[in-house]
Image (cartoon, rainbow, N blue to C red):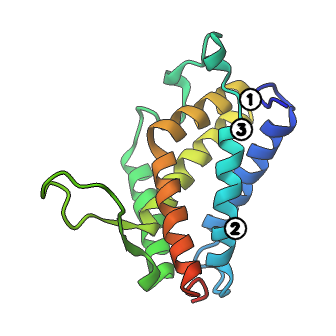
């Protein structure tokens, strides 16, 4: 089953999960339910499977979308940066002690000593890339798929893996409820 064409099941599933993820992240601070982090924990693997299951129309040799038309690609305005920082701050406040984590890596010498990550930063970065794809989805499905696949590969995929790893660690220690 492929999902690269407008209306195909995998494409619709990705768009639906993207909307659900964005709604969940946007709800931070508006709801203080103890299950919010559990909901994030359950959503990320589904989003991960959805994006890697998409077939990128640009990968089949077709002409890809014009990156100049992608939202936010080279037009980061101060307002957008302020919005991103505001979301990061809300997420960080909601996560509290669950935010910071140590990165797992294979260091070379002391160059990478004491590297840490932030779940709030991961979720904010995933949110903005997924949201930009949703903005494209409403007008051009193939453009959205190409954007999601490319931005996943170049940026938010690593944030997704780091967030999943950290949330799994919290779950294993029965610390998802806060």
Q: Quadrant of the C terminus?
A: bottom right
Element class at badge 1 = helix
Residue underneath mark 1 = 141
N-terminal-most mark, 3 or 2: 2
- Residue 90 got which mark? none
Residue underneath mark 3 = 53
- Residue 42 got which mark? 2
Residues 30 and 172: in front is 172
Location of residue 177 by image quarter: bottom right
The residues tagged by marks 3 and 2 sit, at their Cα atoms, a distance apart of 18 Å
Question: Would you call the spot at circle 2 few (<14 residues within 10 Å), some (14-19), or many (20 or more)?
Answer: few
Place of residue 115 in the rendered image (x, y in percent of width and height, measured from the top left): 26, 64
Location of residue 45 by image quarter: bottom right
The residues tagged by marks 1 and 3 sit, at their Cα atoms, a distance apart of 15 Å
Residue 140 visible in the picture: no
Tell me what residue is drawn at x 71 percent, y 38 percent: 53
Count of numbered marks: 3
Residue 39's place in the image compared with 8, above or below, is below
N-terminal-most mark, 1 or 3: 3
Question: Would you call the spot at circle 1 few (<14 residues within 10 Å), some (14-19), or many (20 or more)?
Answer: many
Q: Are marks 3 and 2 in contact (CB under 8 Å)?
A: no
Residues 171 and 10: in front is 171
Residue 85 visible in the picture: yes
Q: Quadrant of the N terminus?
A: top right
């Amino acid at each position: 089953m492929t999902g690269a064409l407008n209306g195909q099941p995998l494409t619709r599933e990705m768009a639906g999960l993207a909307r659900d993820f964005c709604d969940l992240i946007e709800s931070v601070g508006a709801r203080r339910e103890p299950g919010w982090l559990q909901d994030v924990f359950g959503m990320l693997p589904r989003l991960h499977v959805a994006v890697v299951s998409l077939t990128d129309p640009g990968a089949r040799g077709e002409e890809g979308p014009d990156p100049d038309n992608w939202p936010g690609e080279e037009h980061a305005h101060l307002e957008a940066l302020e919005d991103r920082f505001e979301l990061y701050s809300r997420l960080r406040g909601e996560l509290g002690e669950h935010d910071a984590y140590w990165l797992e890596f294979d260091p070379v010498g002391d160059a990478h000593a004491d590297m840490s990550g932030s779940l709030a930063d991961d979720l904010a970065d995933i949110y903005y890339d997924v949201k930009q794809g949703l903005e494209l989805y409403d007008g051009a499905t193939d453009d959205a798929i190409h954007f999601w696949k490319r931005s996943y590969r170049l940026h938010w995929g690593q944030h997704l893996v780091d967030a999943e790893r950290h949330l799994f660690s919290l779950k294993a220690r029965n610390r998802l409820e806060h």
